[in-house]
Image: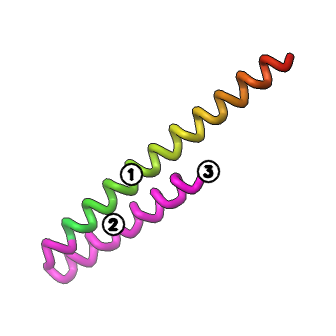
Amino acid sequence: MNQDEIKGKIDKVKGKAKQAAGDFTDDPDLYEEGVDEEAEGETRDEYGKAKRKIGEAVEDVGKAIKR
């Protein structure tokens, strides 16, 4: 896991918590803020996964060239 994946997962959890708090307090603004934060976290997590996979592919190519 890289930093983007970790931060993305944290943002997703924070977003879900804000949604729950918004539901509990009947605060639609807080709920929507949570939805936005969860979506941002999902995007960052997916970006981190893609970045990691590209890095792994580059390493594999480098190893294949060495052979």
Q: Earlier in the sequence, mark 2 or mark 1?
A: 2
| Label at residue 12 | none
Badge 2: how crowded within 10 Å, few (<14), some, or many (20+)? some
> Which residue is more in the foreground, 13 or 55?
55
Q: Do labels 2 and 1 touch, CB within 8 Å?
A: no
- Identified at 25% across, 61% down, the residue is 35
The numbered mark at residue 16 is 2
Question: Residue at horizontal 46%, vertical 50%?
Answer: 45
Instruction: Examine the image and state in which quarter residue 3 appears.
Output: bottom right
Cα–Cα gap, marks 2 and 3: 21 Å
- Which residue lies at the image location 79% right of the left edge and 24% below the top edge? 63
**What residue is shown with label 1?**
42
Q: CA distance from mark 2 to mark 1?
A: 11 Å
Residue 25 percent coordinates (x, y): 18, 83
Q: Nearer the viewer, mark 2 or mark 3?
A: 3
Q: Quadrant of residue 56?
A: top right
Mark 1, secondary structure of its residue: helix
Residue 24 among those drawn in magenta: yes
Q: Which residues are magenta?
A: 1-30
Local packing at callout 1 (Cα closer than 10 Å; few below 14, some 14-19, many 20+) is many
Disc 2 marks which amino acid?
A: Lys
Instruction: Find disc 3 in the rendering and name its residue.
Output: 1
Q: Three-letter amino acid code at disc 3?
A: Met
